[in-house]
Amino acid sequence: MIFDSLGIAASSLKAQQKAMDVVSHNIANVNTPGYSRQKGNISPLIPDQVAGLNIGRGVELNNISRVVDPIVNQAMLKNGSQQAFWQNIQSGLNSVESSFGSLQSTGLSAAIDDFFLSIQAMANNPQDLAQKANVRNKSETLTMQLSNMSQQLQSAQAAADAKIDNDIQSANTILDHIASLNVQIKQQESSAQGITGQANDLRDQRDQAIRDLSVLIPIQEVRTNDNGVLLQSMGGDLLVQDNISNHLARGANSQGFGSIVLAGSNAIVTGLKQGGSIGGSMTLRDDKLGGYLKDLDSLARNLAFGINQVQASGVGSSRTSKMLSGLGVSSPALSVDNVAQSNPYIGQIQSGSFTMHVYDATGAVVGKASIAITAGVSTMASIATDISSNVPGVTASVDSAGRLVIDAGSNNMGFSGDSSNFLAAYQINSIFQGASAAGMKLSSEVAANAGVIATGRIDATTSAIQTGDNTAALAMMAVQNTKVSFDGSTANSLSTRTSLLSSNYGNDVALAAQQSQFHKAESESLRQQREAFSGVNMDEELVTMIKFQRAYEASAKVIQTSNQMMNALLGLIR
Amino acid sequence: MRVTHTQMYDNLLSGVNKQLQIQADGTEQISSGKRFQRPAQAGLDYKISLDLRHAQSGVTGSLTAIDTAQSRLNASQTLLNDMKNILVRGQTLAVQQASGTLGAAERHAAAQEVKHLLAQYANDANGKWQGQSLFAGTAVDKAAFTSDVLGNYSYTGSAQDRLVAINDTQQVASNVRGDHPAFLAGFQALKSLQTALLNNDQVGVQTALGDVQSAGSAMIDLTSEVGGRISALSVSKTSYEDMKFTLSKSIESHEAADIPAVVARLQQASIILQASYSQISQIKSLSLVNFLR
């Protein structure tokens, strides 16, 4: 029986020592991300039955389990994905903040107000060339503001796209890591014959890797019966199964940027915009920045067409002898209003006419002619022919870029009464040129001579021009607060479009900040919950360590006592 | 619930970050005096600011336009007053020369004065302000009146008024056009008076007296009308100045930071920060490790 005591004490020494190892492992990993505290489960050995008595045989450490809460883990997965999504949008939006100006310098809004103030001053002093020069300066400032803003937004789009590339690489690395962990876990748990424990640390690593992946892309996790994990995108595309991982890659262009596909396939991965850093970058790039760019382009087009429409039928204190249209026809054989023409203003062209007036160098009238435009019929070439044939002393042609070139030789020319909108649509006798915010610039005629900025209108009958006539300038002034849409967008005034652009941006930032903050708070709460359940408490571990230490000491004492008992017994024999 | 040291450190760190953010925001508000600066800080409020500034910019433009119109009308009124005085002098001369006691010599002498009056009248009618004809309508680079070989004046300006845009919906004429009947009536009355005096035509002088009187009345009416327009512009200007003041106040109250509240918030954040730092230091010593020696 004394030998039994020795055996029992020996089992205790062994069990306490192993339990101490678990405590030591916990303390060592107190700061390891994703580590779940482990617990050594000690249980008595199966007792012996001797003479109807169950006599205990000692103790053993029968397994080591990790303390995890799957519900919290799942919640962390989803929240991490959403947090990364909104954080990415928020930081991306913050990076373009300077484009939208501040109260100290309201940027585009101030540029538009200043432009129209200069038009008002010009309208009130139409004969004053200095006022026209001021309008030209303000126009230039405005086009630069539009162009800079557009370029900054496009750069931010490109940066978001580059970040997607980086995130794809990170996601692929994690996918490989998870597939590798699947294999390792399977091997460890099946080779541990006779031991019911799990590959705790590897499972922790896999859980952490899955959480890291969900920060990049939104995923669905399915646990398989053979200790494996199957991961798929929110749209059901398989990402990891057992030891197989499907990489993400860039595919064909979508909205100007490469789409995201599964490597080796052209199938676009679906559901990416539901969360994760990549989804955030895509939403930022396509919906947010893309939306602002669309609004900015629309603002630029409506401004350009609204002002050019007045300018086209107006006249300034100077006239030019040669003109080149700002936009050309992409398909010369088709009519100027054909939808195939790459011109955003063709929808405004209708059947009508405009009159060209020709003056000599002294300002005396040389002649005039009306040029008819027939919707669906008139081509750029036919218009050029009409001008050359009918307008005295003027020749017109179409250059290689499809642009109309009008040359009055030593004379100069003016336009009036364009009821067809052809002149404004193709930016002939215009102030602004370009079809987007990025490409907006002053027309070469205005850039060279501010005097050509229209303030009045030519008398259609006599071709007379009154220096103090400000009817055109007044019409330009009205463009600012008139609700218009020349490009199919919702009709709005230019000032409303500008303030909406800023407020939409502000509201997007507010939403992203609010969502980011909410998910951050939720993340902190979940981390606290996980820490409370799975975290290592040093005090707790130290107390447990003392318990095992004392049990170890007591078991050693049992061996010492048993030894003394053996000595006493042997002493009887000697 | 189990509590670990990591939880406590995380909590404290999160709190410290929040308080530091409050410090950063508060400092920005105090240094700028504004409760927000960028659209990212307050989207809708920023839009309201832009709308208010847009309205303010419009009011500034309106005030400048009113000043332009007023200056033109004031210059016009000065010249019209002068023309009215010329007609009054013509009337005085006509009354004197209508007397039967005067002879050809006196009337010839008076005709010389009327000739000068007529020239001065024409000079006023072709008056310029800042190098532009005041009474020629939009033909500001041309003389409003020219005379033929017989010395008869006719209007050569445009039939279009010089409109000044107070805003994009309100326009006012900033000029008096020379084709107003009062101008020509004055020319004709002075011319007929001059002719009658040169011809020593007493009846003609008496007839011209009536014409000069009537032209003078028309000129007085026109001058009064211009005065009325100037007054109306002054009223409008006062209204816009009030609007400008109101908008400035609105912008100020909309954007201004509540400094006492910000300072109180900063003070509170400062106390919380100090307590958090102290607590971080204290937790460090509250560990079983420190007692297991």
Image: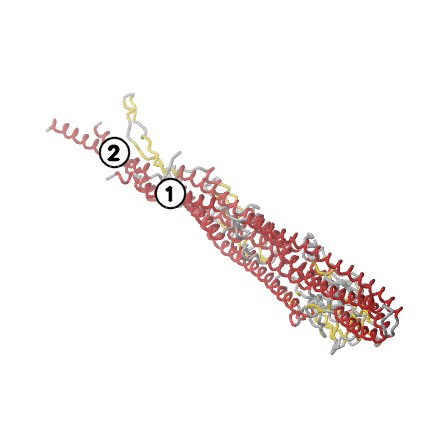
Query: Is there CB contact under 8 Å for labels 1 and 2?
Result: no
Residue A338 lies in quadrant: bottom right
Amino acid at pointer 2? Arg
Which residue is at the far top? A52
Which residue is at the far left? A574
- Across and down, in percent, residue A198 comes to 40, 40
What's the colour scheme?
A: secondary structure
Viewer-nearest residue: A117 or A207: A117
Amino acid at pointer 1? Ser
- Across and down, in percent, residue A306 comes to 70, 60
Residue B15 lies in quadrant: top left
Viewer-nearest residue: B65 or A93: B65
Viewer-nearest residue: A254 or A183: A254
Dot 2 falls on a residue whose secondary structure is: helix
Disc 1 from disc 2: Cα separation:
38 Å
Dot 1 falls on a residue whose secondary structure is: helix
Determine which residue is flagged by label 1. Answer: B276
Which chain does the numbered disc 2 sit on? Answer: A
Which residue is at the far bottom? A410
Determine which residue is flagged by label 2. Answer: A550
Q: Is residue B260 visible?
A: yes
**Which residue does the image show at 68% across and 52% down from the upper left?**
A490
Residue A299 vs B7, above or below: the answer is: below
- Across and down, in percent, residue A433 comes to 66, 65
Residue A140 lies in quadrant: bottom right
